[in-house]
Image: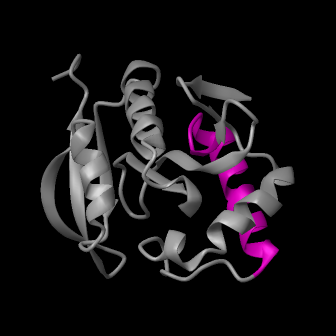
Amino acid sequence: MKILETERLILRVWTLADAPQLFEICGDAEVMKYLGTGKPYETIEQANEFLRWATDYQKASNFCRWAVLLKENQEIVGSCGFACPHGTTEIELGYLLARRFWGKGLATEAVGASLKYGFENLDFREIIAMTDLENVASQKVLEKIGFTQRGIETFNGEKSLVYLAKNPKII
């Protein structure tokens, strides 16, 4: 099920059949360096676990972290979308991209379109994004599309630089 489309990308709901592609992306230590435990996936079951979470979350919330595909060939190149961090009611925008697609503007394109979708289609008032304190590339993406720094905060025992974007139609 397609959620949104940009010039070069399609964001859609994950399916369980996407496990091999997700495992390939998340099995890269550089991709996972600043995410979750900071460790790459070691088994396909980890990909299956994420996909079960994503499909259930989508059904329950009408949003999740979606699959990001290249429009030209339908190749899955990453993930982008929303979730509520554990213990909060805030909406967090998160994303990841396969390393071979870094530096091509695809993260900015996916994140920017997701932010707009969250405000215009899901009526979110505010959206946060969290980055590792050392993840300068991700911080630049967020600042480029209009997020502002809220500050350094601790989630699940980890310090993150938290960014905030407010819906311009609701402010």
With respect to residue 153, does 91 lie above or below?
A: above
Question: Which corner quadrant of the image does residue 88 belong to?
Answer: bottom left
Q: Quadrant of the C terminus?
A: top left
With respect to residue 1, does 93 lie above or below?
A: below
Residue 145 seen anywhere in this rendered image of the structure: yes
Magenta-highlighted residues? 43-68
Q: Position of residue 123 (x, y in %)?
A: 38, 24
Q: Quadrant of the N terminus?
A: top right
Closest to the observer: 157 or 117?
117
For residue 163, side relative to residue 29 (left or right): left
Closest to the observer: 106 or 95?
106
Q: How many marks?
A: 0
With respect to residue 144, does 40 lie above or below?
A: below
Q: Position of residue 82 (x, y in %)?
A: 48, 45
Instruction: Give the residue at x 21% y 22%.
Output: 168
Instruction: Give the residue at x 46% y 45%.
Output: 104
Instruction: Give the residue at x 44% y 52%.
Output: 94
For residue 43, side relative to residue 85 (left or right): right
Residue 98 seen anywhere in this rendered image of the structure: no
For residue 105, side relative to residue 3 (left or right): left
For residue 33, side relative to residue 19 (left or right): left
Provide the major secondary structure of the magenta segment: helix
Question: Is 135 in the magenta?
Answer: no
Q: Position of residue 121 (x, y in %)?
A: 46, 20
With respect to residue 37, does 138 lie above or below?
A: above
Question: Is 46 in the magenta?
Answer: yes
Question: Which corner quadrant of the image does residue 27 belong to?
Answer: bottom right
Q: Position of residue 68 (x, y in %)?
A: 62, 42
Closest to the observer: 38 or 89?
38
Instruction: Give the residue at x 32% y 82%.
Output: 157
Q: Residue furthest right?
A: 17
User: How was this image coloured?
Assistant: one colour
